[in-house]
Amino acid sequence: MDDAGRLQVDKYLRVEGHDNIYAIGDCNSMAPQLAYAAGEQGQLLVKNLLARENKQDLVEWDSQQYEGTMIMGLGPSQAAGQMPGGELMSDEMAVPFKAHDLMVARFHELAGLENNVF
């Protein structure tokens, strides 16, 4: 574990010292600690479990693609965001990512569920 109590993982999100135990999301030591990145780590985990089963090469986690990016919902019709390098997102760019349903539709789709929340 690191100083924050997170599990140390390798570039494939495997818990250090174990080649068949993975940690995704806030419980691992890999940056960034963002909900969107956790979802992407989940998708990578599925790919790597299938690769492992099929005796193929694992795919590495690329945390750099998320550095400096943040999107925050500000109610059902507004959002604010920051792109890598500090450039601010327009409201029109940020709203589709977060404001409408706080990403609920995205996770319904990933799980194969019908999205009838909104």
Image: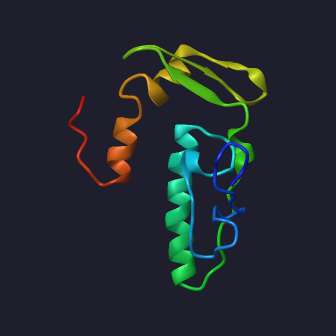
Image quarter of residue 18: bottom right
> Residue at position x 66%, y 67% from top?
59
Q: Position of 61 compared to 37: left or right?
A: right
Q: What's the colour scheme?
A: rainbow
Above or below, comparing residue 83 to residue 5 in the picture = above
Residue 50: x %, y % from top left: 50, 75
Above or below, comparing residue 12 to residue 64 in the picture = below
Residue nearer the viewer, 56 or 30: 30
Q: Position of 14 compared to 93: left or right?
A: right
Residue nearer the viewer, 75 or 13: 13
Residue 113: x %, y % from top left: 26, 50
Q: Quadrant of the N terminus?
A: bottom right
Image quarter of residue 117: top left
> Residue at position x 75%, y 45% from top?
64
Instruction: Give the total number of marks visible in the rendering.
Output: 0
> Residue at position x 66%, y 77% from top?
57
Q: Quadrant of the C terminus?
A: top left
Q: Residue furthest bottom?
A: 55
Residue 108: x %, y % from top left: 32, 45
> Residue at position x 68%, y 60% from top?
9
Residue 83: x %, y % from top left: 69, 27
Above or below, comparing residue 13 to residue 97 in the picture = below
Image quarter of residue 17: bottom right
